[in-house]
Image (cartoon, rainbow, N blue to C red):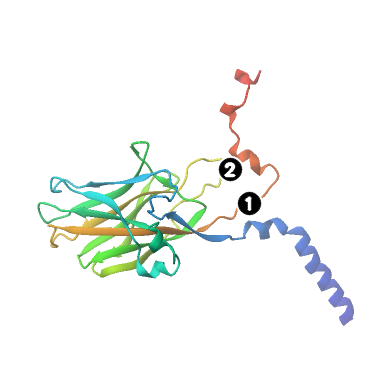
């Protein structure tokens, strides 16, 4: 009797694997970390960076440029880069004429126009190296969901000295993916935003950032015809109205 029950249980278990393989596949995850921008001059990205500021910014500011070097912690990962001079980071100098609710944005530009960087996969976390000068300024990252809404993500205060690795988890209520197949809207990076505390000094501030990275799930459902998601009708020869 016991042997018969064991055979039945084994048969049920085998059938469960045969009947539900697709459900198991849809629940898979493929987490990877990738560098959104290293800020190196030879990083190969299609965009550059500009800075815009609120109304009380001092004339002639902000100033943005890249500097050779990297945080010391990263030197372990790139042992030859220091001698080769192949690593850079982005720096901004800014001044305001008065204290208050001042801010400045560091945003990507492509072909002379403001650009939003599309993320790969489903992002769960962003992190970057930031240099602080012990000012009570706050850092936010602005992202745009697939429905066009912009979300400010608070990264933290910059009241520390030197390089620190800062990160932010992406809230699950931010829509990154449509349930419809073939939608072209992408979850995207809009800008870094740095705000001054209204009572903090604003006469001279430096901001440096290096190696913006993302932890992402790049799992893709595989099904018969998945390659048609990227079909380009405008690039094929067809007659109007399907004639």
Of the pair 140 and 117, the residue shown nearer to us: 117
Q: Picture coordinates of residue 90 (x, y %)? A: 31, 55
Residue for point 12% across, 61% down: 201
Indicate left or right for 45 with 231 as reference.
left
Q: Is residue 107 above or below residue 131?
A: above
Looking at the rendering, in which quadrant would you find the N terminus? bottom right
Mark 2 residue element: loop
Residue 179, numbered circle: none
Residue for point 40% across, 59% down: 84
Looking at the rendering, in which quadrant would you find the C terminus? top right
Mark 1 residue element: loop
Q: How far apart are the alpha carbons under marks 1 and 2? A: 11 Å
Q: Is residue 137 above or below residue 120?
A: below
Of the pair 95 and 24, the residue shown nearer to us: 95
Which of marks 2 and 1 precedes in the sequence? Answer: 2
| Residue linked to disc 2 | 181
Q: Picture coordinates of residue 207 (x, y %)? A: 25, 58
- Can residue 127 be spotted in the picture? no
């Amino acid at each position: 009797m016991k042997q018969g029950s064991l055979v039945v249980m084994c048969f049920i278990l085998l059938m469960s694997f045969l009947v539900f393989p697709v459900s198991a596949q849809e629940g898979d995850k493929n987490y990877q970390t990738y560098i959104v921008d290293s800020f190196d001059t030879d990083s190969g990205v299609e965009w550059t960076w500009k800075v815009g500021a609120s109304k009380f910014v001092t004339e002639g500011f902000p100033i943005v440029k890249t500097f050779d070097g990297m945080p010391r912690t990263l030197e372990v990962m790139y042992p030859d880069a220091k001698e080769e001079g192949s690593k850079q980071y982005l720096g901004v100098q800014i001044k305001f004429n008065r204290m208050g609710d001042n801010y400045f944005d560091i945003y990507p530009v492509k072909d002379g126009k403001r650009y939003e960087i599309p993320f790969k996969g489903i992002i769960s976390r962003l992190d970057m190296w930031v240099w602080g000068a012990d000012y009570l300024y706050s850092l936010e990252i602005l992202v745009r969901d697939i429905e066009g809404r912009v979300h400010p993500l608070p990264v933290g205060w910059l009241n520390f000295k030197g390089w620190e690795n800062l990160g932010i988890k992406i809230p699950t209520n931010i829509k990154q993916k449509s349930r419809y197949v073939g939608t072209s809207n992408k979850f995207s990076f809009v800008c870094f935003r740095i705000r001054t505390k209204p009572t903090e000094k604003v006469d001279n501030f430096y901001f440096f950032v290096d190696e913006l990275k993302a932890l992402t799930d790049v799992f893709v459902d595989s099904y018969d015809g998945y390659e048609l998601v990227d079909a380009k009708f405008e690039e094929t020869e067809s007659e109007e109205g399907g004639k």
